[in-house]
Amino acid sequence: MSTITVRMNKDEQEVFETYAKLRGVPLSTIMKQTLEEKIEDEFDV
């Protein structure tokens, strides 16, 4: 498994981490799901 680094400012980090906690899933899962949905929407997979 590989690792990807995403740079964000403190405000972005707080918003993203809060959202992940509210959903009860790791931030990495939220980011992967969101990217997958974006790709599916764009390509109508």
Image (tube, rainbow, N blue to C red):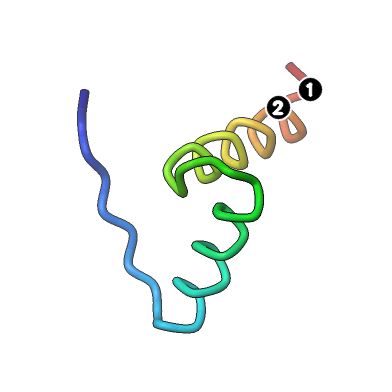
Q: How many marks?
A: 2
Nearer to us in this view, 41 or 8:
8
Locate residue 28, reporting x and y percent: 42, 43
Q: Decide: is 24 above or below 39.
A: below
Locate residue 5, reporting x and y percent: 26, 54
Locate residue 8, reporting x and y percent: 39, 72
Mark 2: amino acid: Glu
- Pick out the residue farthest to the left: 2
Give the labeled residue for mark 1: 44
Residue 19 position by quadrant: bottom right
Nearer to us in this view, 13 or 45:
13
User: Does 2 sit left or right of 12 as displayed?
Assistant: left
Give the labeled residue for mark 2: 40
Which residue corresponds to the image point at 56% horizontal and 54% vertical from the top-left? Answer: 21
Residue 7 position by quadrant: bottom left
Which residue corresponds to the image point at 65% horizontal and 55% vertical from the top-left? Answer: 22
- The quarter of the image holding the C terminus is top right
10 Å crowding of disc 1: few (<14), some (14-19), many (20+): few
Mark 1: amino acid: Asp
User: Does 41 sit left or right of 28 as displayed?
Assistant: right
- Pick out the residue farthest to the top: 45
Kindly state the secondary structure of the residue where label 2 is placed: helix
10 Å crowding of disc 2: few (<14), some (14-19), many (20+): few
Which residue corresponds to the image point at 70% horizontal and 27% vertical from the top-left? Answer: 40
Nearer to us in this view, 34 or 43:
34
Nearer to us in this view, 42 or 10:
10
Q: Are marks 1 and 2 in contact (CB under 8 Å)?
A: yes
Residue 15 position by quadrant: bottom right
Kindly state the secondary structure of the residue where label 1 is placed: loop
Q: Decide: is 33 above or below 19.
A: above
Marks 1 and 2, how far apart in space?
Answer: 5 Å
